[in-house]
Protein backbone atom coordinates (compact mmCIF):
# COMPACT_ATOMS: atom_id res chain seq x y z
CA UNK A 1 0.00 0.00 0.00
CA UNK A 2 2.83 2.39 0.86
CA UNK A 3 4.51 1.76 -2.50
CA UNK A 4 1.24 2.40 -4.33
CA UNK A 5 0.67 5.66 -2.45
CA UNK A 6 4.22 6.86 -3.21
CA UNK A 7 3.77 6.00 -6.89
CA UNK A 8 0.49 7.94 -7.01
CA UNK A 9 2.14 10.90 -5.28
CA UNK A 10 4.89 11.04 -7.88
CA UNK A 11 2.36 10.70 -10.68
CA UNK A 12 0.20 13.50 -9.36
CA UNK A 13 2.97 16.05 -8.85
CA UNK A 14 2.16 18.88 -11.26
CA UNK A 15 4.51 19.73 -14.11
CA UNK A 16 6.36 22.88 -13.07
CA UNK A 17 9.76 24.37 -13.66
CA UNK A 18 10.83 22.89 -10.33
CA UNK A 19 11.21 19.43 -8.85
CA UNK A 20 11.81 20.57 -5.31
CA UNK A 21 8.57 18.87 -4.20
CA UNK A 22 10.05 15.47 -4.98
CA UNK A 23 13.21 16.22 -3.05
CA UNK A 24 11.13 17.38 -0.09
CA UNK A 25 9.91 13.81 0.34
CA UNK A 26 13.20 13.24 2.15
CA UNK A 27 13.74 14.45 5.71
CA UNK A 28 17.18 15.91 5.11
CA UNK A 29 19.35 17.14 2.22
CA UNK A 30 20.84 14.51 -0.07
CA UNK A 31 23.52 14.77 -2.72
CA UNK A 32 22.38 13.15 -5.95
CA UNK A 33 25.15 11.19 -7.61
CA UNK A 34 23.16 8.68 -9.64
CA UNK A 35 19.67 8.08 -10.95
CA UNK A 36 17.67 4.97 -11.74
CA UNK A 37 16.54 5.25 -15.36
CA UNK A 38 18.84 5.78 -18.33
CA UNK A 39 21.81 8.17 -18.36
CA UNK A 40 22.26 11.95 -18.39
CA UNK A 41 25.02 14.30 -19.49
CA UNK A 42 26.13 17.41 -17.61
CA UNK A 43 28.83 19.92 -18.54
CA UNK A 44 30.79 21.89 -15.93
CA UNK A 45 31.23 25.19 -17.71
CA UNK A 46 33.50 28.03 -16.68
CA UNK A 47 34.85 28.84 -20.16
CA UNK A 48 32.99 29.40 -23.41
CA UNK A 49 34.76 30.62 -26.51
CA UNK A 50 33.10 31.34 -29.85
CA UNK A 51 33.44 27.71 -30.94
CA UNK A 52 31.64 26.43 -27.86
CA UNK A 53 28.81 28.95 -28.25
CA UNK A 54 28.46 27.96 -31.91
CA UNK A 55 28.40 24.28 -30.88
CA UNK A 56 25.77 24.99 -28.25
CA UNK A 57 23.66 26.97 -30.70
CA UNK A 58 23.60 23.95 -33.02
CA UNK A 59 22.96 21.40 -30.26
CA UNK A 60 19.85 19.23 -30.48
CA UNK A 61 17.48 18.03 -27.79
CA UNK A 62 17.87 16.46 -25.35
CA UNK A 63 20.39 19.09 -24.29
CA UNK A 64 23.02 18.39 -21.65
CA UNK A 65 22.50 20.09 -18.30
CA UNK A 66 24.93 23.02 -18.19
CA UNK A 67 26.43 23.72 -14.77
CA UNK A 68 27.67 27.27 -15.31
CA UNK A 69 30.00 29.43 -13.27
CA UNK A 70 28.63 32.88 -12.40
CA UNK A 71 31.77 34.67 -13.62
CA UNK A 72 31.14 33.18 -17.06
CA UNK A 73 27.50 34.28 -17.01
CA UNK A 74 28.58 37.83 -16.18
CA UNK A 75 31.13 38.07 -18.98
CA UNK A 76 29.23 36.23 -21.73
CA UNK A 77 25.80 37.68 -22.53
CA UNK A 78 25.91 35.77 -25.83
CA UNK A 79 26.04 32.48 -23.93
CA UNK A 80 23.13 33.58 -21.74
CA UNK A 81 21.11 34.52 -24.83
CA UNK A 82 21.66 31.10 -26.44
CA UNK A 83 20.72 29.27 -23.24
CA UNK A 84 17.54 31.30 -22.85
CA UNK A 85 16.50 31.20 -26.51
CA UNK A 86 16.92 27.43 -26.75
CA UNK A 87 15.61 26.77 -23.23
CA UNK A 88 18.72 24.75 -22.37
CA UNK A 89 18.66 23.41 -18.80
CA UNK A 90 21.14 25.18 -16.57
CA UNK A 91 22.39 24.91 -13.02
CA UNK A 92 24.94 26.75 -10.91
CA UNK A 93 28.55 25.57 -10.90
CA UNK A 94 30.16 26.72 -7.67
CA UNK A 95 33.74 27.12 -6.65
CA UNK A 96 35.81 24.52 -4.80
CA UNK A 97 34.35 23.56 -1.43
CA UNK A 98 37.26 24.96 0.59
CA UNK A 99 36.61 28.41 -0.92
CA UNK A 100 33.13 28.47 0.58
CA UNK A 101 34.57 27.34 3.90
CA UNK A 102 36.74 30.47 4.09
CA UNK A 103 34.14 32.70 2.38
CA UNK A 104 30.82 31.58 3.89
CA UNK A 105 28.69 34.33 2.32
CA UNK A 106 29.95 33.71 -1.21
CA UNK A 107 27.44 30.98 -2.02
CA UNK A 108 24.47 33.24 -1.38
CA UNK A 109 26.10 35.90 -3.58
CA UNK A 110 26.59 33.31 -6.34
CA UNK A 111 22.93 32.28 -6.11
CA UNK A 112 21.84 35.92 -6.23
CA UNK A 113 24.03 36.62 -9.27
CA UNK A 114 22.72 33.56 -11.10
CA UNK A 115 19.10 34.51 -10.32
CA UNK A 116 19.61 38.08 -11.49
CA UNK A 117 21.16 37.09 -14.82
CA UNK A 118 18.96 34.08 -15.64
CA UNK A 119 15.77 35.66 -14.21
CA UNK A 120 15.17 32.63 -12.01
CA UNK A 121 17.03 30.83 -9.22
CA UNK A 122 19.07 27.73 -10.00
CA UNK A 123 17.45 24.35 -9.48
CA UNK A 124 20.75 22.47 -9.46
CA UNK A 125 24.10 23.17 -7.81
CA UNK A 126 27.46 21.46 -7.60
CA UNK A 127 30.83 22.60 -6.36
CA UNK A 128 33.74 22.37 -8.74
CA UNK A 129 35.25 19.53 -6.68
CA UNK A 130 31.90 17.77 -5.99
CA UNK A 131 32.28 18.19 -2.22
CA UNK A 132 29.36 19.61 -0.21
CA UNK A 133 30.36 20.91 3.21
CA UNK A 134 27.74 21.37 5.97
CA UNK A 135 27.34 25.15 5.56
CA UNK A 136 26.95 24.81 1.80
CA UNK A 137 24.36 22.09 2.34
CA UNK A 138 22.46 24.28 4.82
CA UNK A 139 22.26 27.22 2.40
CA UNK A 140 21.16 25.04 -0.52
CA UNK A 141 18.48 23.33 1.55
CA UNK A 142 17.17 26.72 2.70
CA UNK A 143 17.13 28.03 -0.89
CA UNK A 144 15.52 24.81 -2.21
CA UNK A 145 18.38 24.06 -4.58
CA UNK A 146 19.27 20.45 -5.32
CA UNK A 147 22.81 19.17 -4.80
CA UNK A 148 24.04 17.34 -7.87
CA UNK A 149 27.30 15.43 -8.11
CA UNK A 150 28.12 12.81 -10.77
CA UNK A 151 28.69 9.08 -10.95
CA UNK A 152 31.17 9.33 -13.85
CA UNK A 153 33.51 12.08 -15.03
CA UNK A 154 34.56 12.05 -18.69
CA UNK A 155 38.01 13.47 -19.37
CA UNK A 156 40.27 13.23 -22.40
CA UNK A 157 42.21 10.47 -20.62
CA UNK A 158 39.25 8.35 -19.55
CA UNK A 159 37.05 5.95 -21.48
CA UNK A 160 33.80 5.47 -19.67
CA UNK A 161 31.65 2.39 -19.45
CA UNK A 162 28.22 3.72 -18.63
CA UNK A 163 25.42 1.91 -16.84
CA UNK A 164 21.79 2.65 -16.05
CA UNK A 165 21.37 5.69 -13.82
CA UNK A 166 24.75 7.26 -14.53
CA UNK A 167 25.07 11.03 -14.35
CA UNK A 168 28.09 11.94 -16.47
CA UNK A 169 30.05 15.15 -15.95
CA UNK A 170 32.32 16.76 -18.54
CA UNK A 171 34.75 19.51 -17.52
CA UNK A 172 34.92 22.51 -19.85
CA UNK A 173 37.31 25.03 -18.35
CA UNK A 174 40.07 27.13 -19.84
CA UNK A 175 42.70 24.97 -18.15
CA UNK A 176 40.96 21.62 -18.70
CA UNK A 177 38.31 20.73 -21.24
CA UNK A 178 37.14 18.02 -23.56
CA UNK A 179 37.34 18.80 -27.26
CA UNK A 180 33.98 19.50 -28.83
CA UNK A 181 34.38 16.60 -31.26
CA UNK A 182 34.95 14.31 -28.27
CA UNK A 183 31.71 15.57 -26.71
CA UNK A 184 29.92 14.90 -29.99
CA UNK A 185 31.33 11.37 -30.10
CA UNK A 186 30.19 10.73 -26.53
CA UNK A 187 26.69 11.96 -27.40
CA UNK A 188 26.60 9.83 -30.56
CA UNK A 189 27.63 6.69 -28.65
CA UNK A 190 25.01 7.06 -25.92
CA UNK A 191 21.32 7.81 -25.55
CA UNK A 192 21.38 10.64 -23.04
CA UNK A 193 18.17 12.01 -21.57
CA UNK A 194 17.12 14.90 -19.31
CA UNK A 195 18.29 14.68 -15.72
CA UNK A 196 14.72 14.45 -14.34
CA UNK A 197 14.06 11.32 -16.39
CA UNK A 198 17.26 9.67 -15.19
CA UNK A 199 16.53 10.41 -11.54
CA UNK A 200 12.76 9.95 -11.39
CA UNK A 201 11.74 8.23 -14.60
CA UNK A 202 9.46 11.02 -15.83
CA UNK A 203 9.93 14.31 -17.61
CA UNK A 204 9.02 17.80 -16.47
CA UNK A 205 7.84 20.48 -18.85
CA UNK A 206 9.44 23.85 -18.29
CA UNK A 207 8.09 27.22 -19.30
CA UNK A 208 10.22 28.80 -21.97
CA UNK A 209 11.89 32.03 -20.97
CA UNK A 210 10.60 34.96 -23.06
Image (cartoon, rainbow, N blue to C red):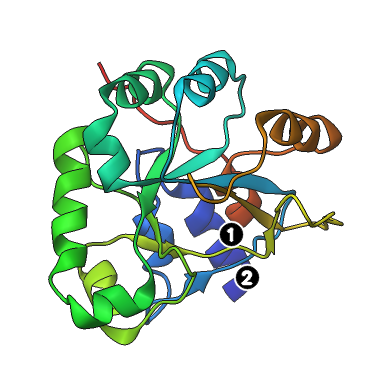
Q: Is residue 58 above or below residue 203?
A: above
Badge 1: residue crowd in 10 Å (few <14, some 14–19, many ≥20): few
Q: Position of residue 28 (x, y in %)?
A: 37, 81
Q: Locate residue 8: give its quadrant.
A: bottom right
x and y percentages locating residue 144 in the rendered image: 27, 62
Percent x, y of residue 181: 73, 28
Left or right: 159, with 166 as reference point: right
On screen, residue 107 versus residue 78, left or right, reads left
State yes or no: discs 2 and 1 in contact (Cβ < 8 Å). Answer: yes
**Residue 37 image offset from top left, x and y in percent:** 72, 53
How many numbered circles are shown?
A: 2
At label 2, counting other C-alpha atoms closer than 10 Å, the crowd grade (few under 14, some 14-19, many 20 or more) is: few
Q: Is residue 28 above or below residue 187?
A: below
Which type of secondary structure does the marked residue at label 2 adopt? helix
Tell me: 125 left or right of 164: left
Q: Quadrant of residue 157?
A: bottom right
Q: Name the element at disc 1.
A: helix
- The front one of 12 and 21 is 21
Indicate whether 136 appears above or below 107.
below
**Circle 2 sits on which residue?**
3
Residue at 65 percent of width and 50 percent of height: 198
Work out which residue is located at the far front of the displayed protein and give it.
175
Q: Residue at x 57, y 20 (%)?
A: 55
Identity of the residue furthest to the bottom in this view: 134
Residue that badge 1 annotates: 7
Q: In the image, what residue occupies the spot 29% across and 28% down?
A: 76
- The quadrant of the image that shows the N terminus is bottom right
Q: Quadrant of the C terminus?
A: top left
Q: Is residue 119 visible?
A: no
Find residue 93 and name its label.
none
Q: CA distance from mark 2 to mark 1?
A: 6 Å
Res. 77 in view:
yes
Amino acid sequence: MTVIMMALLLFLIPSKNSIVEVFRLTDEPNVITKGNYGISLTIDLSYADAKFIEWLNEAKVPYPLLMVDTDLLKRSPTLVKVIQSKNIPIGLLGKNSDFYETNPSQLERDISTFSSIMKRPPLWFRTKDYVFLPEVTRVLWKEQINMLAASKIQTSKSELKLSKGDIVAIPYHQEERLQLKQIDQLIERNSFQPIEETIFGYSIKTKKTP
